[in-house]
Image (tube, rainbow, N blue to C red):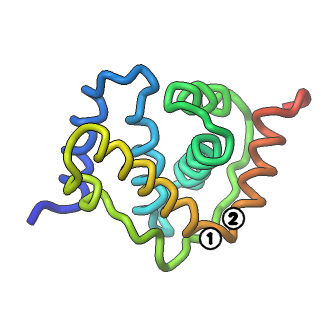
């Protein structure tokens, strides 16, 4: 059985070759990054992943728009907070996404995967929203 990392690479091939200009690939990067995070994971990776999921699911950003927000955030001089890693990080995995039929069905499961990971980090939602407001939308950022 392929590892989750191998499955992620297979899914990346699918999303990177996806014809939709919304750039669905960004969403799998964010979901996988925070779902697979360990205590040694750099705080910026978890922060960017959670910010990406927040912007996608709560604010309706496309993958391209999330990618642009990540680029803007990368230019900021910020000490990235450490988010607590929940024991359970969503009931959907990259393997579940790959099991879905490519096309509309798989794309729907990608969104559900992102939502399940985002829900697992419910204790961090307010902190993520505050971070986005301060670091991305604040005129003083």
Where's residue 56, x and y in %? 58, 41
Where's residue 109, x and y in %? 36, 52
In the rendered view, would you say 41 is above or below 63? below
* Location of the N terminus (image quadrant): bottom left
- Work out which residue is located at the far front of the displayed protein and give it: 104
The 10 Å Cα crowd at callout 1, few under 14, some 14 to 19, many 20 or more, is: few
In the rendered view, would you say 96 is above or below 45? below
Using the image as rendered, state which of residue 66 and residue 62 is in the foreground.
Answer: 62
The 10 Å Cα crowd at callout 2, few under 14, some 14 to 19, many 20 or more, is: some
Q: Quadrant of residue 37?
A: bottom left
Where's residue 134, x and y in %? 83, 41
- Work out which residue is located at the far bottom of the displayed protein and give it: 87
What residue is drawn where x is 53% and y is 54%? 42
What residue is drawn where x is 77% and y is 48%? 131
Identify residue for label 2. Answer: 124
The reply to whether dot 2 and dot 1 touch (C-beta < 8 Å) is: yes
What residue is drawn where x is 24% and y is 55%? 5
Label 2 or label 1, whichever comes before in sequence order: 1
From the image, state whether disc 2 or disc 1 is nearer to you: 2
Left or right of 83: which side holds 113? left
Left or right of 105: which side holds 110? right
Q: Quadrant of residue 133?
A: top right
Cα separation, mark 2 vs mark 1, equals 8 Å
What residue is drawn where x is 72% and y is 32%? 76
Q: Which mark is residue 84?
A: 1
Report how many numbered discs are placed on residues in the image.
2
* Location of the C terminus (image quadrant): top right
Q: Secondary structure at mark 2?
A: helix
Using the image as rendered, state which of residue 141 and residue 117 is in the foreground.
Answer: 117
Left or right of 54: which side holds 21? left
Left or right of 90: which side holds 46? right
């Amino acid at each position: 059985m392929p590892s989750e990392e191998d499955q992620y690479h297979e899914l990346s091939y699918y999303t990177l070759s996806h014809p939709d200009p919304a750039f669905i690939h960004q969403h799998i990067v964010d979901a996988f990054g925070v779902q697979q995070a360990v205590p040694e994971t750099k705080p910026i990776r978890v922060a960017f992943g959670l910010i990406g999921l927040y912007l996608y699911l709560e604010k309706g950003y496309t993958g391209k728009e999330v990618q642009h927000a990540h680029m803007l955030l990368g230019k900021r001089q910020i000490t990235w907070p450490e988010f607590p890693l929940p024991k359970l990080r969503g009931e959907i995995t990259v393997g579940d996404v790959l099991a879905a039929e490519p096309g509309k069905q798989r794309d729907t499961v990608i969104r559900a995967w992102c939502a399940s990971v985002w829900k697992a980090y419910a204790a961090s939602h307010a902190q993520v929203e505050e971070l986005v407001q301060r670091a991305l939308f604040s005129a003083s950022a």
